[in-house]
Image: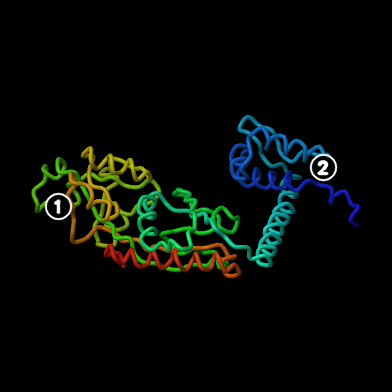
Amino acid sequence: MLGHPAFNLDWNLVRTFVAVAHAGSLAAGAKHVGITHPTAARHIQTLEEKLGFNLFSRTSQGLKLNDVGKQVADAAQDMHASALAFQASTERVRAKPVDRVRIGVSEILAELLPVLLLKSADASEPLAIDMVVSNNLLNLLNRDADFAVRHVRPEQQELVCKRVGLLAMGAYASREYASKFDAEKFSDFASHQFIEGLTRDYLTRGAAKQGLGIDDKQIMFRTDSVASQRAAISAGWGVGVLPVWMGQREEDWVSVFPDGGVIDMDVWLVARPEVRDNDTLKSAFSALGQALEDNLASLGCN
């Protein structure tokens, strides 16, 4: 049985095939597994040669799984899941010490997180951190990171999670923009222009919870980039919603709509399942969670 040709198949070829099939392109699949575009193309070609049939149709729009490829992709995905389970099992057996963790964090928390963690750092047991800044949710089950700080509770039951507090949000405008309005008009949403997230509509949802509506025509600028939102507020494009700690540091900004229209965000610390079985990861998760909880509370974000 061990002499079957399947046992001679290079797992790296299958892993690349799973990534490309899932991502829908060679470039995206290559990026996911951390290889170059030419290497990914070579892996797919080699796998097809070894199998003796094509897995993709080549079109002007790129690669598209053919009918045979779809069938093989299901089996390859099972292999991928089994490989991850095997790796997790060996890690539980080893439970090797960890001196560096990888944390995924959204841009809105990227600047604050090192400050929060440093305040509670234990110098006698240093733990190095690789922080991955992404507004997309990293796949912890696929080992994209050890931990993640998120604004929503994860849906995957396998993940370990802990709510560590609230991130207080405020609505801000430049002094130049605010000078165009009397104080009474700050409660009149219909007279304002707004800066909103492209995929994260904190302001719109917050206003809706207060029974206040914002017309789409009032939103003058949309972006998920926090740096661009800050620049747009400073340039006088309109009112934007950002964390209170951030707004309080901007001397040229004023806080508007203090009585409503802003939504505070839950903050969750999430970990991959291995945190339950690895003492070092478990200790790091506990320390990071406590640091976030204590320091978010110190900012008035509890």
Q: Quadrant of residue 50?
A: top right
Please tell me whether residue 136 is drawn above or below residue 46 in the rendered image.
Answer: below
**Can you name the residue that lies furthest to the top here?**
60
Going from N to C along the chain, the mark reached first, 1 or 2, is: 2
33 left or right, relative to 115: right
What residue is shown with label 2?
51
Q: Position of residue 185 (x, y in %)?
A: 12, 51
In the picture, the quarter occupied by the N terminus is: bottom right
Label 2: few (<14), some or many (≥20) within 10 Å? few
Position of residue 96 relative to residue 77, above or below, is below
Residue pictured at 50% horizontal, 59% vertical: 147
Out of 88 and 49, give the one closest to the viewer.
Answer: 88
Q: Residue at x 72, y 34 (%)?
A: 42
Local SS, label 2: helix
Identified by mark 1, the residue type is Phe
How crowded pointer 1 is (Cα within 10 Å; few <14, some 14-19, many 20+) is rated as some
Q: Is residue 270 above or below residue 186?
A: below
- The residue under the point 61% across, 42% down is 34
Mark 2 is on which residue type? Leu
For the C terminus, the quadrant is bottom left
Look at the numbered disc 1 and give the secondary structure of its residue.
helix
Q: Nearer the viewer, residue 84 or 97?
A: 97
The percent position of residue 75, horizontal first and vertical second, equals 74, 54
The image position of residue 212, as x and y in percent, is 24, 57
Residue ID for mark 1: 186
Is 176 positioned to the left or the right of 195 in the image?
left
Mark 1 and mark 2: span between their CA atoms? Answer: 67 Å
Front residue of 171/12: it is 12
Q: Residue at x 36, y 50 (%)?
A: 111
